[in-house]
Image: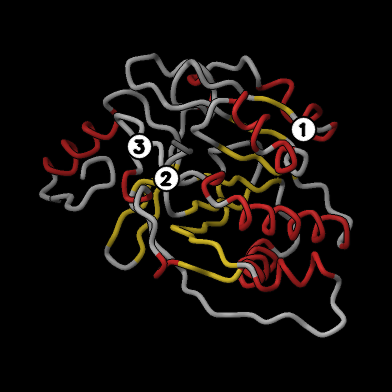
Amino acid sequence: MGAPSHRAGHRGRRGTGATPGMPAHAARASAAVIELNKAHWPVTVLGPGRRIGLWVQGCSIHCPGCVSQDTWPRDAGKRIAVADLLAWCREVSRGAPDGVTISGGEPFDQPAALRSLLLGLANWRREDHLDFDILCYSGHPLRRLEKEHARLLTLLDAVIPEPYVDTLPQGNLWRGSRNQPLVPLSPRGHARYAAHIGAAADDDKRMQAAVEGGRVWMIGIPGRGDMARVEALCAQRGLSLTEVSWRR
């Protein structure tokens, strides 16, 4: 399970072709597509600073108690060209993001698309002389990621791995359950995240909310029972929540 965006939308999709003479890795990135549940800017509750938040569609793990169950099924109708997603990132952040947080869904369930996205983000960072970090959530154990996706890890600055365990306390900042570590993977990641590795969740307990098209989106890591309390408060005010992402 990744960091939640409770109920999520999709900003659209269109195809993009490769340009003749383009380097092979750039051509692959241009042609790549990714199934995307939601993209949001700015996100301030899933990593340090003002961040681009990307939630992929599709998760094979299905952690009990996951609050983003709408991201579980794969959905070809939510495909977007990676090149278009990168263009959106540049446009909305105006070249000034502190970081990018990738969640879901399970990002490593789409390894080729994830690689294209990470390469594109790295190219943008290098070409524009930026210093944003890239943080990725995964419900897979760290050892499995190191064994099966070592090359992808080299493209990240930090990862928060391991499945969400509903029976464990929340514990640490930006994490859903105590078993989930924050693992810096690069010099930038160590500089940016070292002070947060052992930080308690209560040190910065916040959620974001946005209303789009008659739906309420909540971004962040809720505490145990928080979503039930949100439902109860809404009901007291005459607002009925339907099709919530924490139930199927």
Residue 58: give x, y in percent of width and height: 42, 51
Q: Quadrant of residue 176?
A: top left
Disc 1 element: helix
Measuring 67% from the left and 57% from the top, which residue is drawn there? Answer: 117
User: Where does label 3 land, which residue?
Assistant: 62
Q: Which mark is residue 143?
A: none
Q: Earlier in the sequence, mark 2 or mark 1?
A: 2
> Where in the figure is residue 61, as x and y percent of width and height?
40, 36
Are the two marked residues, 1 and 3, in contact with CB atoms closer than 8 angstroms?
no
Q: Label 3's element?
A: loop
Query: Are the two marked residues, 2 and 3, in contact with CB atoms closer than 8 angstroms?
Result: yes
Mark 1 residue type: Gly
Q: Crowdedness of circle 2 by 10 Å Cα count: few (<14), some, many (20+)?
A: many
Q: Amino acid at mark 3?
A: His
Q: Residue at x 36, y 64 (%)?
A: 212
**Vertical comparison of 57 with 106: above or below:** below
Quadrant of the frame with the N terminus: top left
Q: In terms of secondary structure, where does tag 2 sit?
A: loop
Please tell me which residue lies in front, 81 or 53. Answer: 81
Q: CA distance from mark 1 to mark 3?
A: 28 Å
Horizontal and vertical percent position of residue 95: 75, 61
For label 1, count other residues whose C-alpha is less than 10 Å away and answer few (under 14), some (14-19) or many (20+). some
Residue at which label 2 appears: 59
238 or 75: nearer the eye? 75
Mark 2 and mark 3: span between their CA atoms? 7 Å
